[in-house]
Amino acid sequence: MLSMTGMDFPWLSLLLLMLPMGALLTGFMPGKEARWAALTMATLTLLVSLVIVAGFDPKQTGFQFVETTPWMPDLGIAYRLGVDGLSVLFLPFTALLFIGVILASWNAIRTLTRLYFALLLVLEFTIMGIFTSLDTILFFLFWEMTLLPLFFLISLWGSGANRRYAGVKYSLFMLAGGLPLLVGFVFMAINNPGGMSFAYVDLLQGSRDYGVQVTVFFLLLVGFGVKIPLFPLHTWLPVVAQEGPPATVALLTGLKVGAYGLLRFALPLAPQAAHDFQWVLVGLGMIGVLYGAVAALSQTSLRRMLAFSSLSHVGLVVLGIAAFSPQGIQGAVFQLLNFTLVAGGLFLITGFLHQRTGSTEILSLGGVAKSMPLLAALFFFLGLAGIGMPATSGFPAEFLMIVSVLETHTGAGLVVLFVVILGAAYFLSFYRKAFLGEARHDIIRDAPDLKRRELAVLLVMALLVLAFGFYPQAILDVTETSSQYWVSLMLPVEVSP
């Protein structure tokens, strides 16, 4: 059931319209002015997103700031936008991460500067569209449009010798994942009992037969699983992390739109199938959690270690979602928001380190803390948040998910508790070798610490991690009602065989 906010102004459309206009403006400006134009537009986007959050009523069930305009009415396709408690916070968190990426890239991008910053705004436009779409075809268009800016960002500005290979591999994986998504959405629409419709709210109300649910569930699981990524569909992630620009990788690891798609579409649109195949979700989550942690232990590259760490953490998010409980959903959403600050921040620091030393291989590091104490301290703090240290935002998110998994799948919960120890092991071990001890190379001894712009970006992220660690209720209050409603959608109902 839709609920309209008292604010009639089309804030979501404004949010989306600003970004492509800003990208167009940025693309025609000289290099220095292009940076400022991109930063200005990203900042305005953050301000608009904060206005939306301020006007959002977390006690209401359903979607707010709803906008509907006919697009292809004969096919049941419309321009539909809206946010609820599970999506509204992604808007300011996404905007903040893009501001951080723009500032982190300020002096790092020396070629095709206008194109780079314009593509960042285009990418932000597509991500915002993913979080606000309430029409499955509109969602799919935004989903596929992410490929264009990401392909060029990885291929043209990647820091590895195989960056073009990484860009092609990422694009091919995402194109392959998009096909089952489109088939699933179309199949769901033509089997809607009320007539063909691609409206998300209409599809939620439809009592589809069991065969349709099973088909849709597995199609969407595969489609979103590529982007999450789930094992064994994850092989693009370490390649892109190693070869791509660290700032772009910060966006890929910080914005887990695949997990959001799983939560928003794959499960509530096929609730009975999701219950019957809950063991598939739990199994994939357990494999991801364990495999990612074990693989991270054996890495000699900081980038690949963080990539496999991200794979492990998102596996826990899948387990939290698969618990089908309000606590699990709140923990999963909380952790997805954390990724923008923690995983995004860690990859930004990795980029700063690469700019100074030319490498993120463990053999080329050592003694970083002596020459770059601020960089090392902030990396350590965000790393602790990543492994769920109390007083950081990682702790309440992981705690909620672990408790919900232990209540529903005790064996999987015990595996997660074991992986928490592995997470501390691979992070602290790598940190000791790469950041502590004596500097083995002159380039590290002479490297400058964080500049004011870099320090400002990371301090904002670190302070938010600390603030939400001490006061997680600021997040939980917004997500509580929508999480409970999501769980009510997942209650088994009678479906025709």
Image (cartoon, helix red, strand yellow):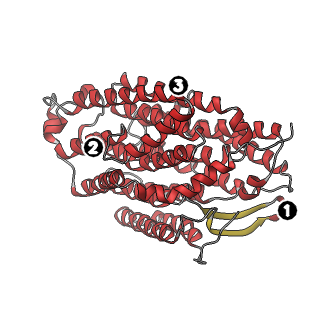
What residue do we see at 36% from left, 40% from top? 386
Mark 2 crowdedness (10 Å alpha carbons): few <14, some 14-19, many ≥20: some
Name the residue tied to disc 3: 411
Q: Is residue 184 visible?
A: yes
Left or right: 475 in relation to 391: right
Q: Which mark is residue 287?
A: none
- As measured in the structure, the alpha-carbon distance from the residue carrying label 1 to the one carrying label 3 is 49 Å
The answer to which quarter of the image holds residue 57 is: bottom right
Q: Give coordinates of residue 349: x percent, y percent.
A: 30, 44
- As measured in the structure, the alpha-carbon distance from the residue carrying label 2 to the one carrying label 3 is 30 Å
Q: Is residue 114 visible?
A: no
Residue type at tag 1? Asp
Name the residue tied to disc 2: 381
Report helix, strand or loop for mark 1: helix
Q: Give coordinates of residue 140: x percent, y percent.
A: 67, 51
User: Number of marks in the image?
Assistant: 3
283 or 428: which is nearer to us? 283
179 or 433: which is nearer to us? 433
- Screen quadrant of the N terminus: bottom right
What residue do we see at 59% from left, 77% from top? 6
Residue type at tag 3? Gly
Residue type at tag 2? Phe
Report helix, strand or loop for mark 2: helix
Q: Mark 1, mark 3: which one is toward the viewer?
A: 3
Q: Which mark is residue 74?
A: 1
Q: Mark 2, mark 3: which one is toward the viewer?
A: 3
| Contact, mark 2 vs mark 3 (Cβ under 8 Å) | no
| Furthest residue in direction front, as rendered | 407
